[in-house]
Every structure is written in C-alpha cells, then in structure tokens.
Amino acid sequence: MGGMILLLISLVSWLALAGPAAAEWRSETVAAPGPVTSIEVRGTDTHIAIGPNWYRMAPATGALIPAQAPGFPAVPPGGLSDGRVASSDGAIARAWLAHPTDRYRHGVLGDAIEAGSVVVERNDGRIATVASGSNAVFEDLLPRIAALDGVDRIVVVKSYLHRGSALAIINAESMKVMAETPPIGHANAWLNPAGIADFDGNGTTDIAVVRQPHVVGLLQLWSWQDQQLKKVAEVPDVSNHFIGSKALGMNWTADFDADGHSDLAVPSLDRRSLRLIAFVPRVRDIARIALPARVATNIGPISIGGRPGLVAGLEDGRLVVIRE
C-alpha cells in the first residue's frame, strides 16, 4: 500500500513538472452559401470569396458575414497584368513586377508570361528597375518587401531559362540583385517562398521556401547572414502551391505553440493535411491536422471567441477552419 501511495505521489509530481498537456488542433468544416473560390489576406484581415461575393468570419461566433472585396492597388502601366503591388511605410514605398515576357514558357502560375524586371519605388520618390537579364525571368506575382538586417530589401523568385529557380534578394539602394540561392539545377524547376521571420530564434531573419512544391516538396530555411543566404534547415513532405494556381500564400507564419518564436503553417505534399512546424529548439511538428480534402487556396488568419486559428478553401469547395 505504501508503495502505491509513493507511486501516485511521484506521478502527481511528474505531471506538475510536465505542465499542461499540449493543445490539440483540429479542422472543422464551415457551412458556406457556395463553393469557396479564393481567400485573400490584406494585413491581418482575411477575405473569403464565395461565388461573386466576399465574406469574413465574425470574431465572436465564426459565422460568415458579408464583407467588401479586398481591393488591391492597380498594377502600374507596363506591369505584369496578374501581378500584385507590394507596399510598405519603410524605405521602399512600392514594388511590382514589370516587362512581361514569354521567353520562359513554364506556365506554372497559369500562363507562360513572366516578368523581365522588378520596379522599385522608394519613399523619397526615386523609381528604378532591376532587370532579370536575358537568361532569366522573375517567375513570381508579388515582390516581397522585407527588413533584412534592419534594411528593407526585395525578396523575389528568379528563374533561369536552363537552371531553374533561385531565391533572389534585391538591394533597393544599388538596385541590383545582391544575393541569391543556387538555382535548382534544371529548367522548369520552381520554388515558392513560404514565410519570412526569425524562425530558428538566433536573432537573424530567415526565409522559408518550398522547393518544387508539386513533385519534391522540400521546405528549406535560408538564413540572412553577412548579406548572404545560408541554408540552415530542410523539412520534407510539404507543398504550398499546385500547378496553374495564382494562390502563392498557401502558408501562414505565427507563434502556434506560444513559445515566443515564429512557426510555419504549411500543407503536406499531398495537401491533405496541414502541418504546424516549429524550428525551436529543433525542427518538429507542433501538430499535423488531417483535412477532408486538399487545400486549394491561400491560408489566412482568423480569431473566433478570442482564440486564433486559420482558414482555408479546399479543392471540393468546402471552407475549413483549423484551430485549437
């Protein structure tokens, strides 16, 4: 009897030291008035397109309520017709893809027209163009403005005609590509950025990309160190795009395990589950949530009853919420 009491005391002590059990994440299908066709995020506001109408989720109940279209800025003349304009309040005011070209007929983003340049407008009014060169294109829809070492840079996908895609960093002062990852190695091999944050907690900015999200699905973490990109981690079995789609935001960055470090939400390679991946203190899955069908839209943040979550559209048109 005494031994049993000691065992119970030890078990209670162990549970106290272990702390509360890890949160359980789950997916829930949300009733919608039609098939979901698009999800767009402006800042932290998530807009859900169902047929010709737009909705958002009520913070108190999670019910769908009518909303205005997200209303993205018009692409300036000469810009990529299906591209987006990036903007910020920092040193770079705006950036967009321009000089459409068909010299790289990959078509992974829905057509065979890519950008031959990136146009950068600084907050002092200066505008300059960074050309890809005749042996490459910018195979992207949105040049991302990101602070690297506290300085605004442009992050964009650059694809070489015979060597495939690389992640390129543009210096907005010199208006040149200042760093890039090695190209994948052969034509029609593409990568898609997944997030920009200090994922591994070492104080430097990291850029997560998915190498060949359609066939390989390898997540690579590139750290910005000494004005160079250094690969610091790789994770297999991920995807954040499907061929022909213009949805490049099939991922989201947030602190999903409340440890003070940024984590990454990204689908598995078959897009039938959502992985919440942490990089501190090691690369690990916080959760892997099964979905009733493949993810087919961007992923956006929501809050229901004060608790954060994510929302996505599935290939069968259903709307799904992922939360604790």
Image (cartoon, rainbow, N blue to C red):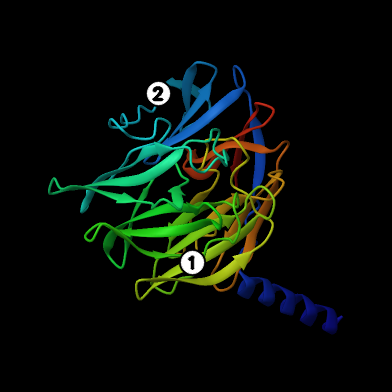
Instruction: Indicate which disc residue 69 carries.
Output: 2
Q: Are marks 1 and 2 in contact (CB under 8 Å)?
A: no
Number of numbered labels in the structure image: 2
State whether residue 96 is above or below residue 266: above
Q: Quadrant of residue 51?
A: top right
Q: Amino acid at mark 1?
A: Trp
Looking at the rendered image, the disc whose residue lies closer to the viewer, 1 or 2, is 1
> Picture coordinates of residue 316 (x, y %)?
69, 28
Residue 220 lies left or right of residue 135; in this view the side is right
State whether residue 57 is above or below residue 51: below
Spatial separation of the CA atoms under disc 1 and disc 2: 34 Å
Visible residue check, residue 263: no
Instruction: Indicate which disc residue 245 carries.
Output: none
> Picture coordinates of residue 213 (x, y %)?
63, 50
The mark that comes first in sequence, 1 or 2, is: 2
Q: Residue at x 51, y 66 (%)?
A: 182
Q: Amino acid at mark 2?
A: Ala
Question: How many C-alpha atoms fall within 10 Å of the one at disc 2: few (<14), some, or many (≥20)?
Answer: some
| Residue beneath disc 1 | 222
Residue 98 lies left or right of residue 265; in this view the side is left
Q: Secondary structure at mark 2?
A: loop
Q: Quadrant of the N terminus?
A: bottom right
Q: Residue at x 68, y 44 (%)?
A: 271
Q: Residue at x 50, y 44 (%)?
A: 307
